[in-house]
């Protein structure tokens, strides 16, 4: 619901007496001050997805309170970089939250909220098994945003035949997120074989001259293949988020084209 429709709905409820002035004021708040955090309720209206909880540096108690606040206004909640110890305490408070120990993410959606909101799928392609943690963060982010994900693992360029065997699935995706460490060559290989956007995610996996992912980052930035964008090292969340935004925009354009064709 956009801002104008939401405002009108609240005003109608006040007029008919189903809610009072104080309740209306509460529903119209754009953020809530918890003391240690200010929850941005307006972010979904501005950006299309609610505020995401970044777990590093926050206590389990703080994350629990943030979740409680976000659940009042939103139907989907994503948290990233949440270690197992914090997750165990969080899961004790919320029976309907899912935790991915590999991705270190939590995901909650309202029971009436559909799992998938958009047609088509996003391919999450990882070079090696060691890159799976970052790839899973991307995949769980995409899932939280209502998009279907197909995971394609361990298809790095050291055995290019493994990648070629999966190319039909990758080519039929709306967007691909390609995750790689070492020399970071996989996004270039994929980018030269598909006609859709590729979001490249460098990982810190690699030996000394990899410089904690810097060599993979620079390789991806210098890719000779067109249509590749690059996020920061180990930023699976950023890669997944960007891919989901692109996918959502493509769905909106398809719906608009279909609606226009009806007249």
Image (tube, grey):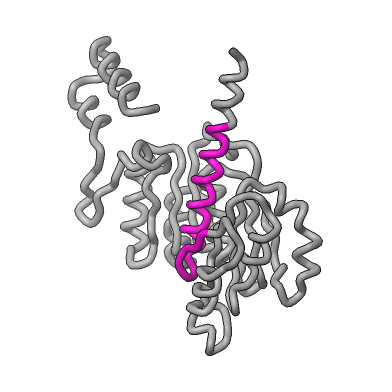
Residue 239 drawn in magenta = yes
The part of the image, by quadrant, that contains residue 71 is top left
Quadrant of the drawing holding the C terminus:
top right
Q: Is residue 45 left or right of residue 117?
A: left
Magenta span dominant secondary structure:
helix
Q: Residue at x 45, y 67 (%)?
A: 232
Measured as percent of width and height from the top left, residue 84 is found at: 49, 66
The part of the image, by quadrant, that contains residue 21 is top left
**Above/below status of 238 relative to 260:** below
Residue that protrudes farthest toward the bottom in the picture: 208
Q: What span is in magenta?
A: 229-253
Q: Residue at x 53, y 88 (%)?
A: 209
Measured as percent of width and height from the top left, residue 192 is found at: 67, 60
Residue 43 drawn in magenta = no
Q: Is residue 195 left or right of residue 30?
A: right
Q: Nearer the viewer, residue 8 or 231?
A: 231
**Above/below status of 22 relative to 93:** above
């Amino acid at each position: 619901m956009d801002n104008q429709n939401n405002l009108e709905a609240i005003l109608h409820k006040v007029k008919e007496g189903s809610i009072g002035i104080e309740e209306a004021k509460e529903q119209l708040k754009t953020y809530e001050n918890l003391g240690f955090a200010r929850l941005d309720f307006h972010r979904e209206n501005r950006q299309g997805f609610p505020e995401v909880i970044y777990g590093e540096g926050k206590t389990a108690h703080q994350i629990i309170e943030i979740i409680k606040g976000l659940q009042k206004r939103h139907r989907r909640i994503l948290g990233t970089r949440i270690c197992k110890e914090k997750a165990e305490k969080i899961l004790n408070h919320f029976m309907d939250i899912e935790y991915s120990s590999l991705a270190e993410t939590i995901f909650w959606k309202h029971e009436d909220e559909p799992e998938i909101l958009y047609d088509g799928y996003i391919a999450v392609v990882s070079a090696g098994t060691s890159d799976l943690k970052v790839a899973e963060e991307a995949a769980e982010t995409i899932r939280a945003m209502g998009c279907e994900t197909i995971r394609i693992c361990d298809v790095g360029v050291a055995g290019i035949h493994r990648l070629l065997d999966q190319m039909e699935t990758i080519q039929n995706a709306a967007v691909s997120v390609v995750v790689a460490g070492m020399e970071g060559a996989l996004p270039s290989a994929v980018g030269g074989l598909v006609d859709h956007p590729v979001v490249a995610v460098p990982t810190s996996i690699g030996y000394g001259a990899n410089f904690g992912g810097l060599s993979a980052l620079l390789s991806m930035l210098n890719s000779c293949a067109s249509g590749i964008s690059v996020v920061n090292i180990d930023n699976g969340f950023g890669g997944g988020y960007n891919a989901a935004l692109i996918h959502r925009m493509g769905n909106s354009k398809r719906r608009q084209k279909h609606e226009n064709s009806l007249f």
